[in-house]
Image: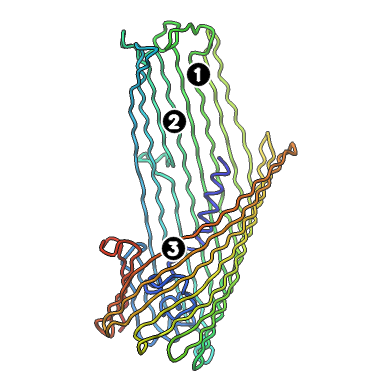
Amino acid sequence: MKKYYFSILFLVMFYQIANSLENTSYRIQTLGSDFQGIIDDEYTDILANPARLNAVDKKQVYVKAASPLTVGYMTSKFGCLVEGYESLNQRENRDERSIMYTWAPTVKHSSDNLTTYKTQNETLDFLFFKPINKGKISSGIGFFGSKNNYVYNNSPDNRYNWHNAGEQDIKYIDLSTTKIIGLHSSISKYQTNIENISGKMVGGFYKQDKHKSREFISTLIILQSKTKSRSYEYNYNDEDPDGNGKDKWGYDISTTPYINWDSAEIISKSPASFKLGGEVEYRNRTNTNNGQSGLVFGVAYQPTKTKTDDISTFQTFSVRGTTVTDVVNISSGTTVSEGNKYKLFLGWGKNVGFVQNKLFFAFAGRMDVSYEDIKQESDDIDTTLTERSRQLTTKIAFPMGLEYFFSKILTLRMGFTYYINGSFKDENVLTDSENRYSLQNKSISQSTNYRAGFGINPFDYLLVDFTTSGDVLNANYWKAQVKYSF
C-alpha cells in the first residue's frame, strides 16, 4: 500500500514540474511540440526566454480557448499570463447477480457489488516576465508559479474523500423458508490527496546577429508538496444468521467461528517539504534565404525528499461457540524517500522553404535522457525496509511538419512525430533480517502522433490558430488560440 502511494506522489510531483504550464503555441503543437527551441515561434520563444520580449513591437493579447484556458498580455516592457485547468472523472458500476447450485437446489446465492471511482485535478498557473536590457545582448527575467491539487475521489459527505469505494453484499437464501442462511459483506475505500506548489525563476540572454541568434536560459525550480492518504478495508461473515446452529450448507458450526469480521485502516501523512532544482539551456539558430536551422541543448537537476508518518489500525472479531475474541493492533511507522533526477536533452532540425517560400518543410531529431535515483527507508515496530530504485529513461523524437501559406489570410499546417521510448529500472530491497531481492525491468515502445491545423489572419491585428490531434471532422477535438495586437 505504501509503495502505491509513493509511486503516485512521485509521478504527480515530476509531472507538475514538467507540465505546470502549456508552454507552446498551437502552431508549434501542430507541427510538433519537439520543434520548440529549434524553429522560430514568437509565443513559444517568449515563454521560454523573457529576453525575447524586447522584440515585441506592439501590445498583444493571447487567449487559448481550450482546456487549459489561457489568457496572456505582452508588451516590450513586461508580460503576464494566467492559465487554469480542471478535470473531473467519475463513474459508478453496480453488478447484481443471482446464482443457483445444482448440488444445493434450495440455496440461492444473491450478490450486490458497487464500485465508485472519482478523481479531480485542479491547476492554476501564472507567470510574470520582464526584459531588462535591450541591445546587442538582450536579457530578461521571469517568474512562473503553479498550484495543483490532485484528489482521488471526493464523496458527497465532506467528512471523507474516497479514492475507490467498493462495497459488496452477498446473501445466501433458503428458498424453502425464504430465510437468510449466510451473510458476507466487504468494503474497500482509498483516498489520496496531493497538493503541489511549484515555481520557476527564469533568467535569459538573447543575441541576434544578421543571420544568427543565440540564447542562454537558466531556470531555478522550486517545489513544495504535501500528501495525505487513507485506506480502509472491512470484511464481515455470518455463517448462521438464522441461529439454527448450521451453516448455509447445513453443516454443524457449533465449534467453528460462525461470526467474524476484520478491519484495517492506514492513515499516511506527508507534511509540506521544500525542494530546489535547476535547468540550463542553450539555443542556436541560423537563418538562410529559404529557411532556418536550429540547435538546442540543456541539462536539468531536481531533488526530491518526502517523509511520511503512518498509523495502522487492525481489528479482528470472531465468535466460536461461547468464545468471543476481539483483538486490536495499532502500529506506527515512518518512511523517508530521497531522490535525485538528472536530465539531458539535445535537438537539431531545419525548416526549409519551397515554392518561393510559400511551402515550408520542417524536420528535426530530439533526444531526452533522464536518470532517477530514489532511496526509500521504512521503519515500523516490526520491520525496517530499505529500497533503492534507479531508472534510466530515454525518449527520441523525430518530428516532421508542413506549413503552407495558401494566401495572405490562410495558412495550412500538419505534423507527424515518431517516438521511440525506452527505460531500464533496477530495484534492490533489503529488510532488517538481511533478506534481499532485486528486480529489473526493461521496456521499449514506439508510437506516432499526427496533428492538423490552420491559421487565419483576416486583419493585421488578428491571428487565430487552430489545432487538433483527433477527428478533423469533429469540432470537439479542435482548439483555438487567438492573438490580438494593438
Residue 96, percent from left and from top: 33, 28
Q: Are marks 1 and 2 in contact (CB under 8 Å)?
A: no
**Which mark's residue is nearer the viewer, 3 or 1?**
3
Residue 347, percent from left and from top: 54, 74
* Label 3 residue SS: strand
State the separation of the CA atoms marked 2 and 3. Answer: 42 Å
Q: Dot 3: few (<14), some (14–19), or many (≥20) neighbours within 10 Å?
A: few
- Please state, as top left, top right, bottom left or bottom right, where the C terminus lies in the image: bottom left
* Label 1 residue SS: strand
What's under tag 1, amino acid-wise? Asn
User: Can you tell which quarter of the image residue 473 is in?
Assistant: bottom left
Front residue of 445/179: it is 445
Q: Dot 2: few (<14), some (14–19), or many (≥20) neighbours within 10 Å?
A: some
What's under tag 2, amino acid-wise? Ile
**Mark 1 or mark 2, earlier in chain:** 2
Q: Is residue 358 above or below residue 219?
A: below
In the picture, the disc for residue 448 is 3
- Please state, as top left, top right, bottom left or bottom right, where the N terminus lies in the image: top right
